[in-house]
Amino acid sequence: MSAALVKAAKQFDALVAALPPSEGGEKAQLKRIAELQAENDAVGQELQKQLEAAVKELKQVQELFSQAADNCLNLKKPD
């Protein structure tokens, strides 16, 4: 059990050492978090617009496919 504890402590120390250094303290970090949230919101809105456009285009393609299929069926001669 103590070996597992030592191993976990070493892993924790390695993870902490891999973290980037803190720059500017808590105030700077909170500002950066707010900037990242704003950027994330903007990207999310753009992705939503793209999704809506893709759904609209899919509906158009489905309608055209349906029309093409109907036209093909109407061209067949009855047996």
Image (spheres, rainbow, N blue to C red):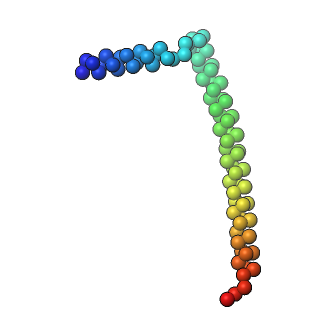
In the depicted structure, whether residue 52 falls above or below residue 34: below
Q: Nearer the viewer, residue 4 or 36?
A: 4
**Could you tell me residue 23's position as x and y percent?**
59, 12
**Could you tell me residue 5's position as x and y percent?**
30, 19
In the depicted structure, whether residue 25 falls above or below residue 37: above
Report the residue that reaches farthest toward the bottom. Answer: 79
The residue at 70%/69% (across/down) is 66
Quadrant where the C terminus sits is: bottom right
Report the residue that reaches farthest toward the top. Answer: 24
Within the image, what quadrant is residue 46 found in? top right
Quadrant where the N terminus sits is: top left
In the depicted structure, whether residue 78 falls above or below residue 53: below
The residue at 72%/50% (across/down) is 53
The residue at 75%/80% (across/down) is 75
**Could you tell me residue 49's position as x and y percent?**
71, 45
The residue at 65%/34% (across/down) is 41
Relative side of 77 to 40, left or right: right
In the depicted structure, whether residue 62 falls above or below residue 48: below
Relative side of 14 to 62, left or right: left
Label total for image: 0
**Could you tell me residue 71's position as x and y percent?**
75, 75
